Amino acid sequence: MPIDPALRSLKVDVPAQPEVLADLSILLSKPDVNLQRVAQLIETDMALASAVLRAVNSALYGLKGRVQSVQQAITYLGTREVGAVTFELALRAVFPAAAELESVWERAKVRGLLMGRVASELGLDAWAAHSAGLFEECGKAVLFRHAPARYRPLLQAAADDLALTRLEHEAFGVSHDALGAAMCESWGLAIEAVVSVRHHVAVQATRQVPLQVPRRGLIALSAVAQAMMDDPEQVPEIVGLVAPQADLDGAVVLRGVHRVMAQIEQAVTPGTAEPSAPRTGSRR
């Protein structure tokens, strides 16, 4: 099968960042975030604002009662999590709806939340971590949009993401991790997020963090978050392997993981969820 030269050179038609997200990125990059301005920006797109409210009112966030406005959602969850929900919904919107991609978006939502919250516990860049989790598999959506008939069988045939990257290279000359990293760069995400997306498949498969890249913390968190989602009993082992390679204290990582898992469990258990403590002026 001939290899598309555009994909081989990474000159694939990567979706452009929607204007509202570009403006949101600028606001969230500032040390003192203007909460009201963030809410107003999201609310300029009524469809997006409605989708954000539906998302934050889901059981995953564990809010008691329903929030009625984006400003109220920010008060309870913080600008980082509401901003990340906005990015997640907008990311989905730039790709065609497809049943094959639903699991990609569902994992992205949970992975982003886990990586962002664990990063916050560790004092790492929580916005970059949340973004890395959201974008980790977006290269699959790029390939699916590029050639759905050719890519669909690969998704069905691959036993795991490592096997999928091999099939992608055979069919297209490039894999979804590289395309995802290219999309992160084009959307202006932090270098830590780009590096994490680029290397996540190899790190999750081998438990080896590439030492030649800077800021390795988020790559390690990617492997930890994957274990939290797929097999929580493996988390201590994964942390013990990847944390030292990223210059992280394994015991501190485990404490952060346990706190975040307890938060999620409380949120999704009926009758136990309480609103998160309000956070003002925070990007978390």
Image (spheres, rainbow, N blue to C red):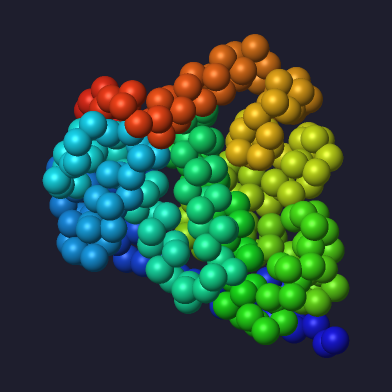
Total marks in image = 0
9 left or right of 273?
right
231 left or right of 35?
right
Residue, far front: 271
Quadrant occupied by the C terminus: top left
Name the residue located 56 percent from the left edge and 14 percent from the top edge: 255
Name the residue located 54 percent from the left edge and 70 percent from the top edge: 99
Residue 150 figure quarter: bottom right
> Residue 84 appears at what percent x and percent y?
39, 47
Q: Is residue 30 visible?
A: no
> Residue 166 appears at what percent x and percent y?
84, 63
Residue, far bottom: 2
Along the line of sight, which residue is nearer the eye, 183 or 256? Answer: 256
Quadrant occupied by the N terminus: bottom right
131 left or right of 279?
right
- From the viewer's perspective, is residue 210 above or below residue 257? below
- From the viewer's perspective, is residue 123 above or below residue 142? above
Q: Is residue 241 visible?
A: yes
> Residue 116 appears at what percent x and percent y?
48, 35
44 left or right of 85?
left
Name the residue located 50 percent from the left edge and 43 percent from the top edge: 110
Along the line of sight, which residue is nearer the eye, 44 or 53? Answer: 53
Along the line of sight, which residue is nearer the eye, 269 or 279? Answer: 269
Name the residue located 28 percent from the left edge and 52 percent from the top edge: 54
